[in-house]
Image (cartoon, rainbow, N blue to C red):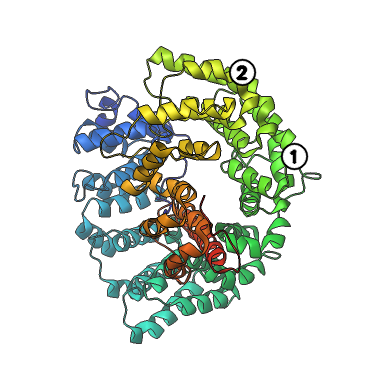
Amino acid sequence: MTTRTPGQDPASTPSTTAGPSTDATESTSPGPDRPPDLTAAVLDGSVLTPGTPARTAVFEAVGADADGPATRELLSLTRHISPAVRRTALTLLGELTYGRTPWPAPAPAAAAALHDPDPDVRRAAATLLVRTGAADRARTALGELTDPGTRIALADALLGTPGASCPTGPLRTDPLPEIRLLGCLEELATAPRERWPELDAQILTEVTALTAHDADRGCSIGARWGRALHRQEREQDCYATVTRLLAGEAGAYGRRVGVQLAHRAFQEWRAAPGTLAPHLVRLLPTAPPGLRALVVPALCASRTATRRSAAALGALVPDPATAPAADPTGPGADPSAALAWDITYALATVDDPRAAPHVHALLTTGARPPGMLAALRGLLRAGAVDTAQLATYAGELLRFEDHDALSLALGILDALDPADAAPCVPGLLTALRAVCEAAEARGATLATWPELSLVGTLGRIGPPAAAAVPLITTLTRDSRRRPGHGALALARITGDRAPVETYLRTRRPEGRRTADHSALFRWLLDHGGLDHEQSEQLRAAVLGRPGAMQVRGSLLLWRNEGPPVATELLAVLPAYLDDDLFGPVAMTTLAAMGPHARPALPHLRALIDRRTRLPLYAGSADADLRADEQLLEAAERTVAALTGPTGPTDGP
């Protein structure tokens, strides 16, 4: 699960004037092991952004020497004159503790910063102190300090850090209701059944007494509550609690917690969206902006909830005819623009045409928010997009030199029919020439992502991309990601089997890795079939080792050999059914096998009959939720195909 780390929001513009510490001044001279841009990245806050060079460099430097120059530089910056810089340094040190606890070096700086005049700095210091392994010092500070925000952050960190022993009994009687609430929720997760009524009552009392909660800066109270109820397998109790909270029994803050708890329930139980979405939808017409900003993401997190609330969500998206679409990711973006995009993306990805006007308006303004390609694909499936206009837009994107524009352009063209994408061939060729020149200047031996993708897109366009044949013929760089992509592109454009046949004959799998040649075999199978040697090669690749070739090539093996291979396929395909990447591919093969795949029905039904979500790792709790829903939808379609009165039963 992904949660916001305190201090990870963009830091305010800091002063570059060093504080009174002489260490802060001396550290501005880069040492041999200190990333030279570390100070600048901390000063502007960019070091907290994943993937930035300075962040990568500091993790590598601290990994090589935990108490070396990089660490000393960060420790000096915890005394910088700017609160934003101090907070950034403490937050980064806290993130660096993962994998190296105990790490005593930052503990003194964290303990000192507990008395910082800035509340956000104090909160970051509290988290860092616990993560360094100094739980005993943190417990002492919790008993001695009086600042509520710092004490709440200490309790939060003590309860949320593995190995930081913190008895919950004293917390449940703390003077602060926030800390009492945290203690109750932690205790509820492991309490015996007979103690549930007592803890439930105190939790509801504490929530009712609050109007806001500092601990929501990390993991929200609703998420904590949901985690505790899920651990105790109290699904129906969770739904009843959400209903009471959303009805207002615990006041305005309790309603916020109810939305958070419903969101967490969506992530844990499959029945939750259908059960709780109607209660959330009823809040939308009258909810104040702050509450609506919680309700909308909760509904949009789930495909099921989005479908059930599509009309209410669609009504919240501004009409482009009366309100210009605003870029949700631009500088100083209005939160309402981000909320409108959340709704638009959710509707589009469940193929709801109501998202089309807003998507079109964003394209007109040149906005490219994250998820635009997935939204466009959904609208293409719904037939709600003008394909000619979309091809024109993709052609315009090809003129940009940045990676994101090229990625979006190629994704759009790959989703269009070849005839619709054909007008973009000149632009694709221009981009491919530029990419190849750059690769040759670097002496690259493997195809880079842009080269690989451009060649693949030209190949999918087919004969209208004939002008690309001379250039593609000269390219010798192959790809581990899509081996044989050049040969496949030439075959698709020219209709000649020779490039693919030659590639498969001369490029045998090496070592323990089985290359994914499924696209090559598919093209041969669709254009004349496989000869004996190719059939044996396909069989060995599919049934030899687990992996992409096995699952993606299984349908080809079924098409090539038919029912005689059913037993062998049924021995390997069920292992992929609960995989969010390969599961739908395996199910496609099972559906094509028809009655011959019925022995797999118990595996499919076991997946469908789960009450809880599959333990997936798609990048975030909401991504895991949607991946589970898509797997469930695919499994239900597959069972219907295998049990229906008619269906595909033959192989070749």
Outermost residue toward the bottom? 194
Q: In the rendered structure, which disc, 1 or 2, sits on the residue that comes first in sequence?
A: 1
- Residue occupying the point 37% across, 72% down: 231
Residue 319 in view, yes or no: yes
Name the residue that disc number 2 marks.
467
Outermost residue toward the right? 321
Where is residue 404 shown, x and y percent of the image? Answer: 54, 32
Outermost residue toward the front? 532
CA gap, disc 1 and disc 2: 26 Å
| Vertical comparison of 16 with 334: above or below | above
- Residue occupying the point 38% across, 37% down: 533
Residue 49 in view, yes or no: no
Pick whichever, 112 or 152, lies toward us. 152
Where is residue 611 shown, x and y percent of the image? Answer: 46, 72
Look at the numbered disc 1 and give the secondary structure of its residue.
loop
Q: Residues within 10 Å of mark 1 (few under 14, many from 20)?
A: few
- Residue occupying the point 25% across, 33% down: 61
Where is residue 353 shown, x and y percent of the image? Answer: 72, 51
Pick whichever, 619 or 538, lies toward us. 538
Name the side, left or right, on which 335 lies relative to 115. right
Q: Residues within 10 Å of mark 2 (few under 14, many from 20)?
A: some
Q: Are marks 1 and 2 in contact (CB under 8 Å)?
A: no
Name the residue that disc number 1 marks.
386
Residue 417 falls in image quadrant = top right
Where is residue 80 shown, x and y percent of the image? Answer: 34, 35
Q: Which mark is residue 132?
A: none
- Which amino acid type is shown beneath numbered disc 1? Asp
Look at the numbered disc 2 and give the secondary structure of its residue.
helix
